[in-house]
Amino acid sequence: MAMTPPLRNFPLGIRLVLIAVIFCFNYFFFPVVGALLTLPFLGMAKIEAVFAGNFGGITDKYVFLFVQGIASLGTFAFTSLLISQLETGFVVKRMALAVKPALKLLVVAVIAVLVSQAFIQLLVDLNQKIPLPHALKFLVEQGKQQEAIENSLLEGTSVFMFLANALVLALIPAIGEEFFFRGIVLGDLLKSKINPVVSILATGLLFSMAHVQPDNFLAIWVLGSFLGFLYYISGSIWLSVAAHFVNNFLVVLLKYIYNAGIIKTNIAEAEIPLYAGLISLVLFTGCVLILNKWRRPIDFNSELDETDVINEEEHYI
């Protein structure tokens, strides 16, 4: 007789609390694991310097990316898979890993990300004009330190560093964060029949808060809500993963081709005219309307039946 997954019958509130507890534990645990794996080769003093962004050379950057990749995979992807197992006992079904997004949805979602960039930058500019309470000023300093580390990682024209940055700064976060915020958190809210708009906006808000970037709060909230919308209209986690990856990869790619001299303007730091931001908003809105028109009804509260069990077992054969 199969054992009932321990979290299956727990109320939503209790499940969310347990998810938060597991997430917080892994948030601190996996960076330590990554650091311990490099400890025999670098020593504690060197590791502390690398974590602070004091890179003595390209090797230090690879070390930082290695630890960052372990931390991101463990905190988000492993946590998501563990929770889905505890909730249902069927990871593939719970995370919608076998659901492929329609090609037309994928194409329009990618276009939406591309055309939204000027609008997103407009939100960043607007956000920076909003005064922040004095008690939260330290978050701005932390954000600047994180930005400085990222800029340092993105310097240079090494193809191998470009690929490492694309993997650790673009692909791994896209998979891990979508698994957690959309697959787990938003999935639980939708299965509990919370209003979809409220669920999507709330998850987007949590996504933005987790990034701890006050200067980009509005932009990340909008992006997170859009990614939640993609998951809701398709039932496929891979659609939001693809859009998230494209958004992250753009930063890595544009910085690399600027460093290589292929383009003469650092687009990431270029000033965006108001009219460009408004045009971007119109195009982005048009893409959202098209995606919503093409959405298919998804029953996020569907129960596992015998067919699901067979499919799940065949997936691992």
Image: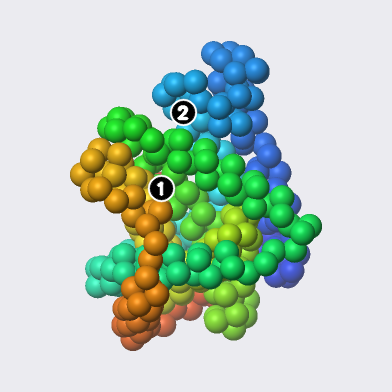
Taking 234 as reference, is 193 left or right?
Answer: right
Give residue 218's quadrant in the image. bottom right
Q: Is residue 39 above or below residue 117?
A: above
The image's colouring method is rainbow
Mark 2 packing: few (<14 Cα in 10 Å), some, or many (20+)? many
Q: Is residue 5 visible?
A: no
Q: Which residue is mark 2?
A: 61
Is 116 positioned to the left or the right of 207 in the image?
left
Q: Residue at x 45, y 41 (%)?
A: 151
Q: x%, y% of residue 279?
A: 33, 78
The x, y position of residue 294, in whole percent, is: 32, 82
Indicate the secondary structure of the residue bearing disc 1: helix
Above or below residue 42? Residue 177 is: below
Nearest-to-viewer mark from 2 and 1? 2
Image quadrant containing the N terminus:
bottom right
Residue 212's label in the rendered image is none
Viewer-nearest residue: 147 or 245:
147
Q: Residue at x 60, y 80 (%)?
A: 198
Label 2 and label 1: CA atoms lie apart by 16 Å
Asked if residue 160 can be seen in this view, the reply is yes
Q: Which of the pair 91/24 is nearer the observer?
A: 24
Residue type beneath disc 1: Ala
User: Circle 2 sits in a helix, a strand or a loop, which is it?
Assistant: helix
Q: Residues within 10 Å of mark 1 (few under 14, many from 20)?
A: many
| Coordinates of residue 233 in the picture (x, y in percent) | 41, 77
Q: Nearer the viewer, residue 117 or 109?
A: 117
Q: Residue furthest left?
A: 262
* Residue holding disc 1: 170
Which residue is found at the position 55% from the left and 20% from the top?
Answer: 38
Q: Amino acid at mark 2?
A: Lys
Task: Provide residue 299's location: percent of width, then percent of height.
Answer: 48, 78
